[in-house]
Image (spheres, rainbow, N blue to C red):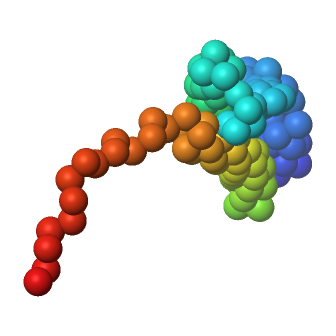
């Protein structure tokens, strides 16, 4: 009987779960240089980053469902070792996706700061003379 349970647990771990189609989204291939980009370039890049953010969130949801499905399929007799492996696999994929999203967002924000600095209006000239401190 133990052999049957162990075999069933192993099969559940190796079988394709319902959510096996979780594919990590592809990061935008190019973030424009804020020092040379046009407003159009920056807006297009922003849209790509937002799309990537949404795709990453969907991927993270998929990973969670995939993990939960695999745990449920393994049944209540899943060993702590097998459960830990499933948990670790999900955490590794989750963390890699979040790290990639943070990297892309950081790169984009850096270029936005450069773009704003380059395109900032000049400070207004003041005709007022400094107050006499005498």
Question: Which residue is most to the bottom?
Answer: 134
Judge by depth and name the residue closer to the eye, 59 or 40: 40
Residue depicted at x 67% and y 22%: 38
Q: Residue at x 25, y 48 (%)?
A: 127
- Quarter residue 130 falls in: bottom left
Residue nearest the observer in this picture, 41 or 58: 41
- Give the answer, above or below, for where 114 lies relative to 63: below
- Quadrant for the C terminus, please: bottom left
Residue 126 image point, x, y percent: 28, 48
> Could you tell me if residue 90 is visible in this image?
no
- Note whether residue 81 is visible: yes
Of 84 and 124, nearer the camera is 124
Q: Residue at x 68, y 37 (%)?
A: 34
Picture quadrant where residue 129 is located: bottom left
Is 29 left, or right, of 50 in this rendering? right
Indicate the position of residue 88 as horizontal and vertical percent values.
74, 55
**Vertical order, 65 against 9 (above or below):** above
Q: Is residue 123 left or right of residue 29?
A: left
What residue do we see at 49% from left, 38% from top? 120
Q: Is residue 132 above or below residue 32?
A: below
């Amino acid at each position: 009987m133990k052999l049957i349970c162990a075999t069933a647990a192993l099969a559940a771990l190796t079988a394709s779960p319902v959510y096996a189609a979780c594919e990590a989204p592809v990061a935008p291939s190019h973030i424009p240089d804020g020092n040379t980009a046009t407003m159009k370039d920056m807006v297009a890049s922003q849209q790509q980053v937002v799309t990537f953010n949404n795709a990453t969130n969907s991927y993270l949801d998929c990973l969670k469902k995939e993990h939960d499905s695999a745990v449920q399929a393994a049944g209540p007799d899943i060993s702590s070792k097998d459960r830990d492996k499933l948990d670790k696999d999900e955490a590794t994929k989750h963390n890699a996706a979040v790290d990639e999203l943070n990297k892309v967002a950081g790169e984009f924000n850096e270029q936005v700061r450069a773009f704003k600095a380059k395109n900032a209006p000049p400070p207004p000239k003041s005709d007022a003379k400094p107050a006499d401190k005498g």
